[in-house]
């Protein structure tokens, strides 16, 4: 293994170096596919190896030399998809993940669904045994060949195809990437016939000018919508912006701040998606949240104009604030392209929201267009003060204490919080940059956190940002072998496990059911606790080459353990800190919710 420079970044990346061989004039179907992946600018292909794409694997290694793209070997297909997901959340661009036949796609399906719900792009490369039954090997090629393999995941894909020739595969890949990276973004799937991959071409294919087939899609707003909303903002006395799925661009971040300041709009953000607005800005009206809180409910009731910028579950937010089925008295503007991706299988479109104007365009393009209109002069905005916290009174470390102590240990380092647990207290850490926080997994599926942390670390390497993922113990235990991939490829990463030794969110659900039925709440823990024996997470990660710390159980130990872990990461390592925390949602998103029972498992 040697280190090579990552494109566009001053860093090195560990890569398996293939033996060089003298090139010849022969070309196989998978060679064309590999060349196309390179031409599309895809830097990485995460994979769990499988014989159905052995032809493509050979082409990426022996034909292209494991350079542009580079292979990332993973221990599970879910990890491969989650790594691509985390990478996209940082960069806004897709990477590829290859999964083996129908069985690998089945493993990958939940992680693909997460990316779909999170509207993040990725290219999933699949493969099947020979479509021609005369070409199939006995037994294995039959059980790994499906009539319509894409049907396994089609309800949560933007597009899929099963090309029958190398030329068709080239065009399918280019089309797929364009579709995946057009808002609303999402995963695409290309299924490659193993026989087509391994077939020797009779002659080279005609040249293909890839850039000309990837022209960007214009998603700007109509002038009518811009003028209408600008007029309403000029005349409104009480404006509320709901900032949802927006870009990671620093320029777009600055535009959102400028627009809010120009019109004096109060701003709300949501922990289900990444940082969209500085949370300690004077106009940020409350801490970020996953569910409704009283301050936002009052703001919705009193606003003259509400502009939702790709807000996740607008109808649910309005119902939680106003009551089911009630519309806001404010003039409602919804800036979103999400309706273009909805289908009849997945209900992630949420309820239908009552709005007065639906602007079908990219949210940040609408912000930019509004700034070009005549708006009020910039207003003086008072700074938002840091919240005060009482010291933890109990014997156990709380999640709030964990967040505050980690922030102290991090100091003035630029940090990216890749993932946060459901019990996170948003008061403990302000977001001041679009990469300060990347958001949730989208689909609420456990096991995604470790892989997304590795993908985020991959994208962040060389940027100077400290990649940090704070995960629940249930999430980590389901996907923890993704740590090996980070160690193997020298991807510095800090994972902190908020370990309450339970599927605690479901303990709360069991308590609610028991109270409703007049049954003993003392039994809520049965079938939930991850104890007896306690799981040695430090030994688990050290077996994969990472450095484990903990279990940390004492208040006095916490900051020192975190500082040591950060030093390990800054030296190029992977550190995992097991922090035993008190179960509960003190100060966290779920505790502030008017509807905590809707929380997903965490």
Image: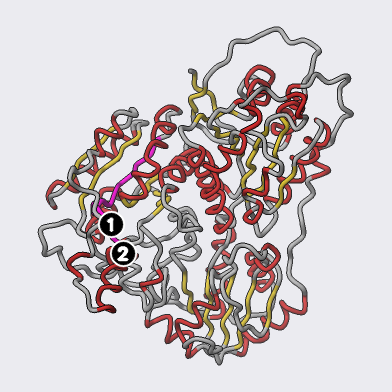
In magenta segment, residue 485? no
Q: Label 1, on which residue?
A: 403
| Residue range corresponding to the magenta coloring | 492-505
Write the residue at 26% across / 35% down.
548
Q: For this rendering, which residue is in front, 271 or 74?
A: 74
Q: For this rendering, which residue is in front, 513 or 343?
A: 513
Q: Is residue 70 above or below residue 365?
A: above
Q: Label 2, on which residue?
A: 425
Circles 2 and 1: CB distance less than 8 Å?
yes
* Badge 2 or badge 1: first in the primary sequence: 1
x and y percentages locating residue 464 in the rendered image: 44, 41
- Mark 1 residue element: helix
Instruction: Identify the image quadrant of residue 175.
Output: top right
Task: Compute the Cα span from label 2 to label 1.
Answer: 7 Å
x and y percentages locating residue 405 in the rendered image: 23, 54
x and y percentages locating residue 253 in the rendered image: 54, 61
Write the residue at 29% across / 54% down.
407
x and y percentages locating residue 534 in the rendered image: 19, 43
Instruction: Identify the image quadrant of residue 506.
Output: bottom left
Q: Is residue 462 above or below residue 382?
A: above
């Amino acid at each position: 293994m040697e280190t090579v420079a990552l494109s566009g970044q001053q860093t090195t990346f560990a890569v398996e170096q293939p033996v060089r061989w003298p090139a010849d004039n022969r070309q196989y179907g998978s060679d064309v596919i590999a060349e196309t992946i390179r031409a599309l600018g895809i830097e990485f292909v995460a994979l769990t190896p499988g014989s159905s794409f052995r032809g493509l694997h050979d082409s990426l290694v022996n034909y292209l030399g494991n350079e542009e793209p580079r292979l990332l070997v993973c221990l599970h297909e879910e990890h491969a998809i989650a790594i691509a997901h985390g990478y996209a959340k940082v960069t806004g661009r897709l990477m590829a993940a290859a999964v083996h036949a129908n069985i690998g796609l089945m493993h990958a399906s939940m992680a693909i669904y997460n990316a779909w719900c999170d509207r993040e792009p990725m290219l999933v490369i699949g493969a099947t045994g020979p479509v021609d039954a005369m070409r199939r090997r006995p037994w294995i090629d039959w059980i790994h060949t499906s009539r319509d393999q894409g049907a396994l995941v089609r309800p949560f894909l933007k597009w899929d195809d099963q090309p029958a020739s190398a030329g068709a595969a080239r065009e399918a890949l280019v089309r797929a990437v364009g579709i995946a990276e057009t808002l609303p973004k999402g995963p695409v799937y290309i299924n490659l016939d193993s026989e087509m991959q391994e077939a020797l071409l009779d002659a080279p294919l005609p040249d293909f000018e890839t850039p000309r087939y990837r022209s960007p899609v214009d998603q700007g707003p109509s002038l009518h919508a811009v003028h209408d909303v600008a007029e309403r903002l000029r005349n409104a006395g009480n404006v509320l912006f709901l900032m949802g799925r927006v870009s990671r661009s620093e320029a777009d971040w600055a535009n959102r701040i400028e627009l809010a300041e120009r019109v004096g709009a109060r701003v709300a953000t949501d922990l289900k998606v990444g940082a969209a607005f500085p949370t300690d800005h004077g106009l940020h009206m409350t801490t970020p949240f996953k569910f409704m809180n009283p301050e936002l409910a009052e703001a919705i009731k009193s606003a003259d104009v509400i502009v939702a910028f790709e807000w996740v579950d607008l109808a649910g937010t309005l119902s939680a604030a106003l009551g089911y089925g009630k519309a806001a008295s404010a003039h409602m503007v919804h800036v979103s392209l999400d309706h273009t991706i909805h289908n009849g299988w997945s209900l992630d479109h949420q309820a239908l929201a009552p709005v007065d104007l639906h602007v079908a365009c990219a949210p940040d393009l609408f912000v930019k267009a509004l700034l070009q209109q005549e708006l009020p002069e910039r207003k003086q905005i008072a700074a938002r003060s840091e919240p005060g916290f009482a010291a933890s009174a109990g014997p156990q470390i709380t999640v709030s204490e964990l967040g505050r102590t980690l922030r102290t240990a991090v100091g003035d380092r630029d940090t990216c919080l890749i993932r946060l647990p459901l019990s996170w207290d948003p008061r403990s850490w302000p977001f001041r940059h679009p990469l300060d926080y990347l958001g949730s997994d989208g689909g609420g599926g456990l096991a995604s956190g470790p892989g997304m942390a590795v993908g985020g670390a991959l994208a962040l390497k060389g940027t100077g940002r400290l990649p940090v993922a704070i995960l629940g113990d249930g999430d980590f235990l389901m996907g923890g072998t993704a740590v090996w991939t980070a160690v193997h490829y020298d991807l510095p990463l800090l994972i902190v496990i908020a370990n309450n030794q339970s599927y605690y969110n479901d303990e709360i659900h069991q308590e609610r059911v028991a109270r409703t039925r007049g049954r003993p709440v003392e039994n809520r823990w049965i079938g939930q606790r991850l104890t007896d024996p306690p799981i040695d997470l430090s030994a688990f990660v050290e077996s994969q080459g990472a450095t484990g710390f903990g279990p940390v159980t004492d208040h006095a130990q916490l900051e020192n353990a975190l500082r040591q872990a950060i030093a390990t990461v800054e030296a190029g390592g992977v550190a995992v800190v097991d922090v035993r925390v008190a179960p509960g949602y003190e100060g966290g998103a779920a505790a502030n919710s008017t509807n905590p029972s809707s929380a997903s498992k965490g």
